[in-house]
Amino acid sequence: MSIIREYHHVVADQFYKGLGVALMRKESDVMVELLLELKRQHIVALPIHDGVLVADGVHEQTIEIMEIVFEEYVGVAGVVNIED
């Protein structure tokens, strides 16, 4: 374990504090709210890991919603990437 702590010395003081689990929960909360908001706006979305698959015609609207939801939950602006 000391090799891992040494390699990640910048954040090693945060190990074993439950931060990873808390961040996973935050990511899950953001995704659920995103999917619910897309549903409210009648946008069909398929969640895939940490993103969503939507039709081409609604991708700009989806990006806007993603950015709003992320900032509401995390408190900072997010970055959205589009993959073809």
Image: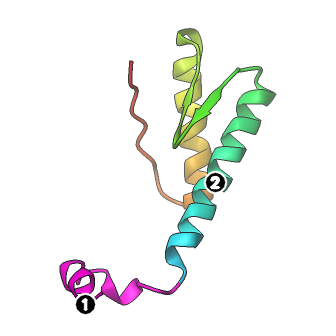
Stretch in magenta: 1-17
Location of mark 2 (residue) = 28
Residue 49: percent from the left, percent from the top? 53, 41
Please tell me whether mark 2 sits on a helix, a strand or a loop: helix
Amino acid type at circle 2 is Ser
Q: Is residue 5 left or right of residue 65?
A: left
Location of mark 1 (residue) = 2
Name which residue lies at 54% across and 66% down: 23
Please tell me whether mark 1 sits on a helix, a strand or a loop: helix
Residue 31: percent from the left, percent from the top? 63, 45
Name which residue lies at 50% across and 71% down: 20
Q: Is residue 26 left or right of residue 5?
A: right
Disc 1 crowd, CA 10 A, few/some/many (<14, 14-19, 20+): few
In the image, residue 18 sits, relative to residue 48, either above or below, namely below
Amino acid type at circle 1 is Ser
Q: Quadrant of the N terminus?
A: bottom left
Residue 39: percent from the left, percent from the top? 77, 28
